[in-house]
Image (tube, rainbow, N blue to C red):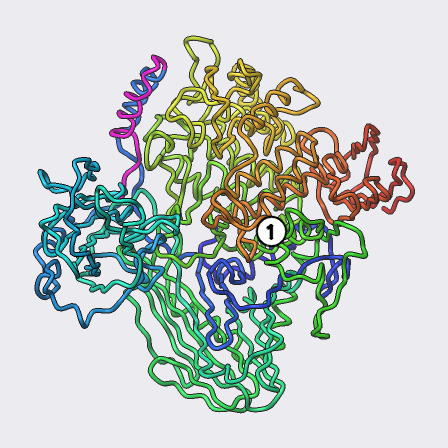
Amino acid sequence: MKTDIRNTVLAAGLFLLAGMISTPVVLGQTKKQGLQDDVLWYTAAAVKWTDAIPLGNGRLGAMVFGGINRDRIQFNEESLWTGEPREYDHPGAAVYLPEIRRLLSENKQAEAERLADEKFMGLQSKAGNKKKWFDDMRAGKGITGNPSLAVYDDSKWKTIQVPSYEGWEIVGLEGMDGAVWFRTTFVLPANFNSSSSKKEKPGSGEIANSKADWMIDLNRIRNHDFTYINGHLVGTTEGNEPRKYGIPYQFLKPGKNVLSIQVLNYFDKGGIAGYKDTTKHISVYPVNGTPAKAISLNGKWKYKVQNDEPPAVPHFQADYQPFGDLVLDFGNHQTNKEQNYRRDLSLGTAISTTRYTVGDVHYTREYFISQPGQVIVVHLKADQPGKINFSATLKSPHKNTHFRKIDNYTIAMGVKVRDGALKGESYLSAKVTKGKVVLEKGKIVISGANEVTLYLAAGTNFINYKEVSGNPDLICQRAMSGINNKTYAEVKAEHLREYQPYYNTFSIRLGNKNRQGMTHPDSSTTLIGRQKPTDKRLEDFKNGNDPSFAALYLQYGRYLLISSSRPGSKPANLQGIWNEQLSPSWGSKYTTNINLQMNYWPSEVLNLSPMHEPLFNMADDLAERGRQTAKTHYGASGWVLHHNTDIWMATAPINSSTHGIWVTGAAWLATDLWEHYLFSQDKHFLATRAYPLMKSAATFFNDFLVKDPKTGWLISTPSNSPENGGLVAGPTMDHQIIRTLFKACIEAAEILQVDTAFSKVLQKKYHEIAPNQIGKYQQLQEWLEDKDDPENKHRHVSHLWGVHPGNDITWEDQPEFMKAARQSLIYRGDEGTGWSLAWKINFWARFKEGDHAMKMIKMLLSPVGESGGSYANLFDAHPPFQIDGNFGGAAGIAEMLLQSHTRYIDLLPALPADFSSGEVDGICARGGFVIRMKWENTELKSLQVISKAGNNCHLRYKGMEKNIPTKAGGVYTFDKELNIQQTKI
């Protein structure tokens, strides 16, 4: 287990020496230069976070906005999370397992779920004193006077935009939890009190027996509101229910009326959220009126923070946290209108560049994150001397933040996570050519410089999931010391030497050559791809003809994986390594019922094996925690992992039994290690890393599986079909994963010549596990019973796991089940969240229907809507942002070009008409093969295979098959008929 980021560089070097990168390249050069479409570019600065350009070195992440007057670089450090080392398992849970199983076998699902929720779920973190804080807030502690009264003086209060669907954090109360008062006014006509006998039913918070002549519609408020009209309480609600309160006319008056709301928010997004559909306004209106008579309450409201220290709220798991912002302020830099603005990201160099002209001065900023140096780098220059003038400031959304001076060129910012054990330090240092540097009030102020390089380091006290005694200052000091005597050119060169060997193992072109190589008006930059900025290409892709954009998206997925999961770092979470919110969606955790695994689908096939290593390190830690969970919750040996985990390696079931008791997370992760062996053929890795974890996961299921009294099959119970259908016995996905795990363990034991007796046990049970079944709608059943609803459009298609990423169902061995799986996918529909669309690309590729897979690519690569799509920076949208869709989409495109999950290596198995011509170099196949191929007009033109391990190579293309022996290191060239043309050993 790697527990210290200071070992990162050494770990990376050892991993490379172990042969995990299969195709050596010349450092500093891009393979197939001129053929690849590998630049994202834009003609305006980022406005939203999802417009910004992501950078990362595995441990540090940054989002670059590229503003002219004000540039924001929001940054993260991988180990800054909420929470602390603690126990997650529920003591005594296993006692209730037989009863839960009995209830499920008797079809008493609701009773089973209630018992499991009470006695079986994992433990939450400690809670604060909610009652005392609530009583204090309602008693007015922390605020002068009574803000609910109409006569209250709020003239000195600040203003804020109301509503804010994404929380008050987005409109000015960044990092805020607590009690806040809001006030606004609305004007009623003189005849406002005309009433009607037809009354609208008031909401849950309406004061009893009040006569509702008017209504106030506030929709969502997070989390608890007390709503007053002219000092009268008209409603209060706690929770996520819509607020619609009745107002007796005697509470109102002609002319100006005062609306006051006290909002109590304990965690997550806060404030008056209103309607997600922004065309709908929060409002007041007469009960007998028409929509035209509604008075909108949207606009600027007065607000006052009463208290920002709410009690700690118990959580099942921790949240990934932002660290802070680096803000560059250029003052009145835009005196003259800027020209020739461009910001871009070169995937081949992992460098973002912002360029623009002000007057006759050309400005350039380069940004990257150095893995050797462990620093975020910003280099600023102009083409005229003395023109660089700006201030640099650090800030953070964390309330507990402090600043200090380190030396005459360096400032520091320290942060402490609320209600958690982790703290961090960041150092910002400036190196200046000519010019003047002054430190004032926590800023680095630079004037009259020719060039400036900013270096930003960050670290935390996290050591491992059991220890938080690290020294974040020391991490920063060592990073700064490492680059102290180096020039910017040297730091940049080191960055390229480390990054490019990963990226350059693979290249791709989709579309005709004459669509590439256009030149931007800036002669210093070659723009690969169409002469359109990336956001415009995204808008046009669905209805246009731009296959190279899909190639760009694939390479962007590879870039994101390299940036968020380097050897020695932690694995990519739900947002990779990028997050700006203290309460990110789903905690930006590691969701292990598909999302974490999907992050690594591109790693092997797209020649990025080293990026898989952080997941294997996490599996080591999870296995250690998961063995205790297996004993405590199931009385079983081996290790278990449920549907979510965090930096503290939680393995217990969380949230609710309806989706949290899903038992096959460890089994799925174990198959990831097996997949790495299949691609790499590294027997040392199989023996020392993969097989022990695989065997332990299989040992759990050897104990856990029970005989179904109705069918006699071995089944998995209790469990879920992820996030669909509640707590059940015998979900199809579990059985597919367990069979795949048992089969892999049997094969691994034979390869390693170990565990013969255990292997025989697995062989017997393999055949006793409940099989795949075809239901009454000719669908693949999702559950043990035939109860699928063909109208169900759920985003998870879990029972098709055996089609992809597994191979429990294939055209070669179970064509009838492939047909049933296809029918299930048709019923489920094409629509879905971003990652769900990505998964469906892979399904349709496995069904060998390339044009349908292409349809899904175009849906994924569409501007974000309510259902999936992509943001302007090509981040995947659930929505909101989840990075798994980027990785799943990249893997899906690869799956259309090459498949190796059966005994064959299928060439161009799902080629759509849009990809009728192209070439790929560096795509990998199971068995230890690296492949280069070129095709035109859907016909294979050339093929080259590199054999890493000397296995037989069984090729298949359009019905033709060729099975040839190979030697390790051999290079074999074929023609379009799969005849060998040349062999190099």
Whether residue 414 is visible, yes or no, is yes
Front one among 332 and 62: 332
Q: Is residue 117 magenta?
A: yes
Badge 1: residue crowd in 10 Å (few <14, some 14–19, many ≥20): many
Image coordinates for residue 302, horizontal then vertical, percent: 23, 65
Q: Residue at x 90, y 36 (%)?
A: 979
- Which residue is pictured at 50% across the width and 67% down the height? 65
> x, y (%) of residue 638?
43, 30
Where does the image place residue 871, in percent across and percent down from the top left?
53, 53
Residue 416 visible within the image: no
Q: Quadrant of residue 360?
A: bottom right
Three-letter amino acid code of the residue under disc 1: Gly
> Compared with residue 722, is residue 417 higher up or lower down, i.e. above or below?
below
Looking at the picture, does residue 489 appear above or below residue 138? below
Per the rendered image, the range of residues in magenta is 105-124
Residue at screen point 46% across, 36% down: 593
Mark 1 sits on what residue?
557
Task: Classify residue 140 by image quadrant.
Answer: bottom left
487 or 283, nearer to the observer: 283
Circle count: 1
Tell whether 815 sits left or right of 182. right
Main SS category, magenta section: helix
Residue 66 appears left or right of 125:
right
Is 764 included in the stretch rendered in magenta?
no
Q: Please indicate whether residue 297 sits to the left or right of residue 479 in the image.
A: left
- Image height of 708 relative to 887, above or below: above
Residue 215 image offset from top left, x and y in percent: 21, 45
Q: Residue furthest right?
A: 981
